[in-house]
Amino acid sequence: MDFDQYAGSYDELLRKQHAFFSRDRSYFHRRKVEELRRVAPAQVRRVLDYGCGTGGAIPEICAAFPRAEVVGYDPSAESLAEARRLCPNTRFMAGDALCDERFDLVYMSCVMHHVPPERWTEVLREVAGLLSSGGVLSVFEHNPLNPITRKLVRDCPFDADAVLLSMTQLRALFRESGLSPDYSGYLLFVPERLGGLRRAEQLVSWLPLGGQYFVAGTGLRTAV
């Protein structure tokens, strides 16, 4: 999928699509960054948002890790232009610029389903190579077991190439890529307005009905 063509309208398209669930996309970012904080290593000096798109999650990541350097990476130049307007004090990268970088925490949100399945292991291995010693990779994906999620993906113009993968598949891919899937869970069970129920989400994170899920862990063969 060429995300350059959607960079200017990306956030508005998602806002309309997710209007029932939340007033704006910041709810989704906040909820996922809550989980990111929970699985993060004790000391976080550098955080990478891998596949940051237009940078919507960057403000939430910066707020969660105020002492860390936060870096955004995306192959879409137009998306990065939007991200720089939103977060002018954040460093953004594209292309092969990441080769010599290392991070204590890497966040990947809804990236893998845009990767051709035959490259899933290759991409995870590349990202695992960006981890510092003891670093954690946290991957968030759409839950294919949730019928509402499947409909939203089916109706989304920039998800035309999407191949959804299950939590079981992603945990297996972690192992194949030299990563230990230490943490996992489902999230986004209820709309934002049902705040009381939302606070109980962690109690049922094992239930495969959330709109999304995450798998997080460290490298079995830790990068130097």
Image (spheres, rainbow, N blue to C red):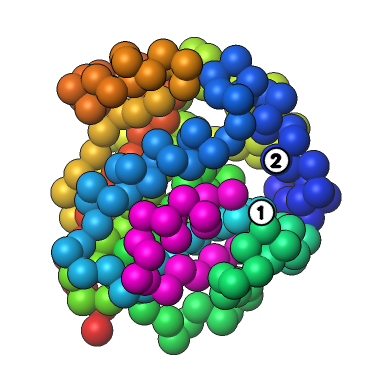
Quadrant position of residue 101: bottom left
Q: Which residue is mark 1?
A: 54
Is 59 part of what is drawn in magenta?
A: yes
Q: Position of residue 18 (x, y in %)?
A: 61, 24
**Image position of 186 (left or right of 147):** left
Quadrant position of residue 123: bottom left
Q: Quadrant of the C terminus?
A: bottom left
Crowd band around label 2 with a 10 angstrom C-alpha radius: few (<14), some (14–19), many (20+) = some
Instruction: Give the secondary structure at mark 1.
Output: loop
Say above or below: 137 vs 201.
Answer: below
Q: Position of residue 72 (x, y in %)?
A: 54, 66
Name the amino acid type tagged 1.
Thr
Quadrant position of residue 201: top left
Q: Earlier in the sequence, mark 2 or mark 1?
A: 2
**Could one spot residue 4 in this view of the protein?**
yes
Q: Pick the residue in front: 139 or 82.
A: 82
Q: Residue at x 52, y 50 (%)?
A: 57
Is 75 part of what is drawn in magenta?
A: yes
Q: Which residue is mark 2?
A: 11
Q: What are the residue bounds of the magenta stretch?
A: 56-76
Question: Pointers 2 and 1 in contact (CB under 8 A)?
Answer: yes
Q: Position of residue 98 (x, y in %)?
A: 50, 78
Q: Position of residue 90 (x, y in %)?
A: 57, 70
> How many numbered marks appear?
2
